[in-house]
Amino acid sequence: MKIRRGLKLATRVLVALLVIAGSVWAVRRWRQSSNPVDAPTAAARQGDFLVTVRCRGALAARRSVQMTAPLDVPDLQIVWLAPPGSRVKPGQVVIRFDPSKSQQDLKEKQSALDQAQATLDQAVAQARITADQDKLDLSTAVYNKQKAELEASKQAIVSAMQGQESAIDLKIAEEKVKVQQATNELHRKSDEAKIASARRLRDAAKAEVDLIKYRLTVMDLKSPLDGVINYESNRSQGWMNAQPFKVGDHTVGGTVIAEIPDLSTLEMESKVEEIDRSRIQIGDDVLVRVDSFPEKVVHARLSRISPLTEQSFDEWPVDRTFRAYALLQNPDPNMRPGMNAGADIVQSRIASVVSIPAKALFTRNGKPAVYVKEKEQFNPRQVTVIARNPDEVAVSGIGAGTLVSLTDLAERKP
């Protein structure tokens, strides 16, 4: 009797436990079926879909002008610089060198020029005086010769002795004329040599003055275009101590001090992987997003693609990629060369297609699927992928406006 009662009691307890377990399971299932699933969603949109190739790179200027220290100017020292990175206009002074040494040299060379010019003027005046005196002396000698010729013509009416004296005087007068002519020529040649020497000294002094005046005109370097000033490194103290040029630095002629990129020629320089090279071509539209201006999308057009891969040492490990260049259309005035940016090269456009965010597409039973929100519940639905880009996927199988989950609900545990 006791054994039977024990069995009955155990049976009742077991039945009670089964009933409780079944009730708990039923309540749990009811709650799962009645409570909505909380998951972030996005609405499928319909419109043009862009198939793009995404790449990274930086802005660069296709055209830039280097500012170099003037040649033939000794002891160049920078006394003023336009602020680094500032916007400059054509004709604006951007670099100024110390002109005091050249100004002092100009005063000294101008004094030497004035002295040389005075020496030349004196030589010319003295030559004129000598020429006038020689002309007078020659006229006197010619007059004496003519007088002697007149006296010699009287030989027929005077004594023989007087006639011989007149003939001798005539020869002496003729010789004096020749001597005076030779003297005049000697004086002329000598004066010409003195004048030529003085003129050479004057011209040399004038050339030095002109050179120093030229040096003073190039002490101010002016911007040839509208751009941004960037200063190069001063390596006069060695490569290890190289720093951008600053006020007080000394330099020599021909040294590149700064570079001014032309902002109107800004272009996007992108690194294109080899696998994507065949998907792009010159003339493709490009959407550029500069990291410093994330809210702006700048339109560009692909203008150049490197024919061969180029090696880059900017990152490790070293890689080889193609280079694609897209000229920006209407860039922001505050954009500068060297700014990092991303580019979406538009490979093709698909009109009037439904697209969803890329992270809303999942794989279910080996096929693409989405989780569609219906009556507070998410139900899986198989879709067909038409095209992809890094952010969106064009699909068929759902309509525009359909809410899809952005998380994989299959991974959630009940």
Image (cartoon, rainbow, N blue to C red):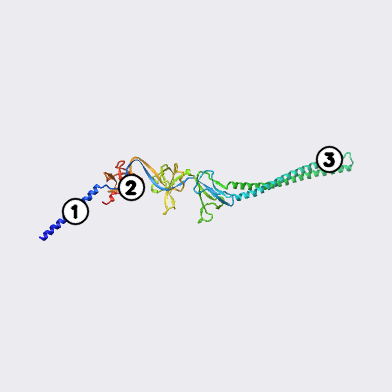
3 or 2: tag closer to the N-terminus: 3
Residue that label 3 marks:
147
Considering depth in this image, is 263 or 49 the residue closer to the camera?
A: 263
Tell which of 414 and 304 is nearer to you.
414
Number of marks present in the image shown: 3
| Residue topped by disc 2 | 359
Q: Secondary structure at mark 3?
A: helix
Which is more N-terminal, label 2 or label 1?
1
Extreme residue toward the left, this view:
1
Camera-nearest residue between 361 and 87 = 87
Q: Report the residue at 11% width, 61% height from top.
A: 2
Tell me, yes or no, whether the two marked residues, 3 and 2, touch with CB atoms within 8 Å: no
Residue sitting at x 78%, y 44%: 180
Q: Mark 2 belongs to which amino acid? A: Lys
Which residue bears the numbered disc 1? 20
Q: Which element is circle 2 on?
A: helix
- Give x and y (percent) for residue 347: 38, 43
Q: Residues within 10 Å of mark 1 (few under 14, many from 20)?
A: few
Is residue 359 visible from the viewing direction of this image?
A: yes
Q: In this rendering, does residue 271 appear at all?
A: no
Q: Secondary structure at mark 1?
A: helix
- Which of the two discs, 1 and 3, sits closer to the camera? 1
x and y, in percent, of residue 76 in the image: 57, 51
